[in-house]
Amino acid sequence: MCSAELAPINYRSLASSSQVTVVGQSVGASDVSLQLHRLVEHKKFPFSTQCECLNFNTMLDLVAYISAIIPKQVGCATEDDAQSLGTLECLREVPFHVLTNLSFTASREARPPFGEGFFSPTFDVNFIHGRPSQLLRAVKFVKGTPVIASWMTNDGAWYVTPTTSTDQEVLDSFGLWLFGLSNSTKKKLLQLYSVEGLERLVREEYDGPISAHYYRAA
């Protein structure tokens, strides 16, 4: 909601309603979609990115390490209790702008320039009981929930180097997000996203000398 003319939201009424539509775009779509494993009788509108997207190549020890960075900086955690309820209660008392500034700094230093994907949801056996891809195969998700799934054109172009122009550079562009892929998986990815199928997206008069490989990686 961007317009100042919109009526203020009555959150108390919203919380008690049985008809709630949740909308998210990109990372927000991932977060919205993850609710399919928890909430019932609500509508979902994930916009670019669906519920299979958790912390990329999730490694729980890495997620725990990343999650502890900010609590330690504000004095809410030690090496031994970063995942404790006490740490959470302490963080709730820290001013929002302090947490935001520290989080942005940490994520941008780790993944310049925007810090994308540094803090991401993961399965914790509490809220999310496993990888969504595995839960979906096992039919362990909320049934009967209306879902509108959509996709934004070139949503991934944000993350790709404009000079990307070869098969190897396309594969290298995955490195920040996906690692440990087998050679057969890499070969399959290149086959699924062929250069020929994406040449129509190249607009030299608008983008300049951009290769179809750029859109392929995106």
Image (cartoon, rainbow, N blue to C red):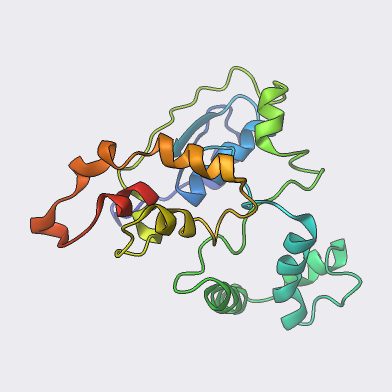
Residue 168 place in picture, x, y as percent:
43, 56
Task: Looking at this view, name the residue that lies furthest to the top.
Answer: 144
Answer above or below: position of 70 versus 12. below
Q: Is residue 2 left or right of residue 67?
A: left
Task: Looking at this view, name the residue that lies furthest to the right.
Answer: 80
What residue sits 84% from the left and 63% below the top? Answer: 83
Q: Is residue 127 left or right of residue 158?
A: right
The answer to which quarter of the image holds residue 86 is bottom right
The answer to which quarter of the image holds residue 179 is bottom right
Answer above or below: position of 26 versus 88. above
Which of 157 and 47 lies nearest the eye of the viewer?
157
Residue 184 place in picture, x, y as percent:
57, 40
Answer above or below: position of 87 versus 187. below
What residue sits 49% from the left and 26% below the top? Answer: 147
Q: Is residue 53 left or right of residue 190?
A: right
Which of 211 and 26 lies nearest the eye of the viewer?
211
Determine if residue 184 is in view: yes
Which of 76 and 134 lies nearest the eye of the viewer?
134
Determine if residue 92 is in view: no
Which of 174 and 12 lies nearest the eye of the viewer?
174
Q: Is residue 78 left or right of residue 113?
A: right
